[in-house]
């Protein structure tokens, strides 16, 4: 008797549960990848990531940088003939990765996301200089962006201190509740 | 009609001149726009890839505030804010489980009733081109521009529900009404690298270089934008790109609302022209607009 190849569909189902998108709709036309501005930097291109999810290649998707390089420009999902929303799929993969203890392998993007959210939780709003400083500390690239950022500061577009936000307690409460629910 | 304004975090920061020019234009057009007082950050580019619930709960709070304040229509000038707010409305309406969870987190009930507008949608569909045309005092005669829409203004179509996603015309139409010549070009909706500005700057430099190269060929006076991320990336990084690729652009990146302000008779101070890094005033003076 011929052996039947079994495919592990758990990961595809996990993705669907997180974001509602069914990756099996994809028939590999590659339109997503052809329009993707980040495909040049991704080891696995969008259509390949989807294929990998279809085939249950969870580690390949979660441990590699590719999915983290998606910057949600929405070109792929706008063009997909199957109406598959790859941005939702990528977000779901990122969320699952974080829940399962994988760190974002792209250090700078990880530093940006963490700094952004921790400042938001603390001050209730984005605070640009604080954001730049935190990213510098986390990535140890101290001189980066000094030359480009200075004009912004001189033109009054960067403030040194965080803006005062009256309902910062609301933001903190929302963060706390989300953390509480999601750690369950 | 009374409109609520959701300024977002960049309105007084990196997009300060955008805010100033939106305020100036609304004043001249005598529009009843009032800031929503009780708002919080939408979570922008970082919440949605960390927690779906957080990315829904943050906008939900603001949407309920808007309704409480009596705003049936809410203007969100920052394109990323408009995207997050519109996404939240759509998802809350379609996914009852998510709605209940987010309501629990925020401690407020979502009843809908507030429509969110991006800034271009607001001027073209709510205010209308006719009203803008009538208010023109100083036509932008002889000014040659390209309009750059970037990624979030028309995408994702199921959320933005605005203009033609692959070939938008709304900002071009505003420019034409103001008297400027707006050229067609193929990179209107390409991406500038958005939120990678402070993380993977190399990506932003490459993508903006591709855009600037294409624009250079067209020989236009300036690039017109509607998004503060596009503006900041193309303006602030231009020197760095010129250095890296050993070339010269010197192309001003101007908000469409700043040009609206000029054509409608606002002073250059009112629209924050001096805050732009590549200075548009020489070319504007040459054309007799400033
Ligand atoms: S465009 Fe859609 S169907 Fe085509 S490869 Fe990409 S995800 Fe699959
Ligand atoms: S949303 Fe992500 S995957 Fe899709 S085209 Fe943009 S960068 Fe590429």
Image: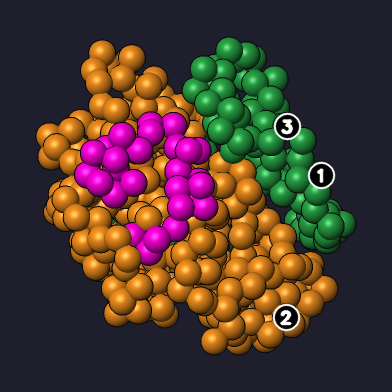
Residue A180: give x, y in percent of width and height: 83, 56
Q: Is residue A145 above or below residue B128?
A: above
- In front here: B120 or B135? B135
Q: How many labels does the image show?
A: 3
- Residue position for label 3: A160
Residue B78: give x, y in percent of width and height: 52, 57
Q: Are marks 1 and 2 on the same chain?
A: no
- In the rendered image of this protein, which colour is used for chain A? green
**Circle on res. B96:** none
Q: Magenta stretch containing residue B280, yes or no?
A: yes
Chain of the residue where label 2 is placed in the rendered structure? B
- In front here: B48 or A85? B48
Q: Determine crowd level at label 3: few under 14, some 14-19, many 20+ residues with C-alpha closer than 10 A.
A: few
- Residue position for label 2: B69
- Residue position for label 1: A122
Which one is closest to the eye, mark 1 or mark 2? 2
Q: In which quarter of the image is residue B97?
A: bottom right
Residue at 73% across, 32% down: A160
Residue B191: give x, y in percent of width and height: 34, 44
Residue B156: give x, y in percent of width and height: 38, 63
Residue range of the region highlighted in magenta in the rendering = B263-290
Q: Can residue A137 be seen in this view?
A: yes
- In front here: A80 or A12? A80
Q: Which chain is orange?
A: B
Horizontal side of B80 relative to A66 (left or right) equals right
Element at badge 2?
Answer: loop
Report the Cα–Cα distance between label 3 and label 1. Answer: 16 Å
**How is the protein colored in the picture?**
by chain
């Amino acid at each position: 008797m011929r052996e039947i190849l079994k495919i592990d569909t758990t990961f595809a189902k996990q993705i669907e549960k997180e974001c509602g998108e069914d990756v099996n709709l994809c028939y590999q036309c590659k339109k997503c990848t052809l329009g993707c501005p980040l495909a040049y930097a991704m080891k696995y291109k969008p259509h390949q990531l989807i294929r990998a999810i279809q085939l249950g290649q969870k580690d390949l998707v979660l441990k590699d940088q590719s999915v983290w390089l998606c910057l949600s420009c929405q070109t792929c999902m706008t063009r997909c003939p199957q109406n598959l929303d790859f941005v939702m799929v990528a977000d779901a993969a990122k969320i699952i990765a974080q829940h399962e203890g994988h760190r974002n392998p792209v250090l700078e993007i990880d530093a940006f996301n963490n700094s952004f959210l921790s400042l938001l939780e603390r001050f209730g709003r984005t605070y640009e200089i604080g954001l730049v400083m935190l990213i510098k500390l986390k990535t140890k690239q101290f001189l980066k962006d000094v030359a480009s950022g200075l004009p912004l500061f001189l033109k009054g577009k960067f403030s040194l201190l965080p803006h005062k936000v009256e309902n910062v307690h609301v933001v903190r409460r929302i963060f706390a509740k989300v953390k509480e629910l999601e750690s369950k | 009609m009374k409109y609520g304004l959701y300024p977002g975090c960049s309105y007084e920061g990196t997009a300060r001149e955008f805010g100033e020019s939106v305020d100036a234009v609304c004043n001249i057009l005598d529009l009843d726009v009032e800031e929503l007082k009780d708002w919080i950050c939408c979570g922008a580019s970082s919440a949605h890839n960390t927690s779906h619930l957080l990315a829904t709960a943050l906008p939900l709070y603001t949407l309920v505030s808007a309704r409480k304040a009596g705003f049936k229509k809410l203007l969100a000038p920052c394109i990323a804010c408009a995207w997050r707010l519109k996404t939240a409305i759509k998802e809350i309406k379609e996914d009852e489980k998510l709605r209940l969870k987010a309501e629990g987190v925020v401690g407020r009930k979502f009843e809908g009733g507030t429509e969110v507008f991006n800034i271009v949608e607001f001027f073209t569909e709510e205010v209308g081109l006719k009203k803008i045309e009538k208010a023109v005092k100083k036509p932008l005669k002889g000014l040659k521009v390209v309009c750059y829409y970037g990624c979030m203004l028309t995408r994702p179509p199921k959320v933005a529900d605005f203009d033609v996603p692959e070939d938008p015309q709304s900002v071009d139409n505003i420019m034409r009404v103001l008297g400027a010549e707006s050229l067609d070009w193929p990179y209107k909706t390409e991406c500038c690298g958005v939120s990678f500005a402070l993380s993977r700057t190399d990506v932003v430099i490459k993508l903006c270089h591709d855009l600037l190269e294409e624009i250079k060929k067209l020989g236009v006076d300036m690039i017109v934008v509607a998004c503060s991320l596009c503006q900041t990336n193309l303006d602030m990084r231009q020197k760095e790109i010129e250095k890296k690729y050993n070339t010269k652009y010197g192309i001003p990146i101007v908000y469409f609302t700043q040009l609206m302000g000029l054509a409608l008779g606002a002073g250059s101070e009112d629209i924050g022209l001096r805050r732009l890094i590549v200075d548009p005033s020489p070319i504007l003076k040459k054309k007799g607009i400033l």
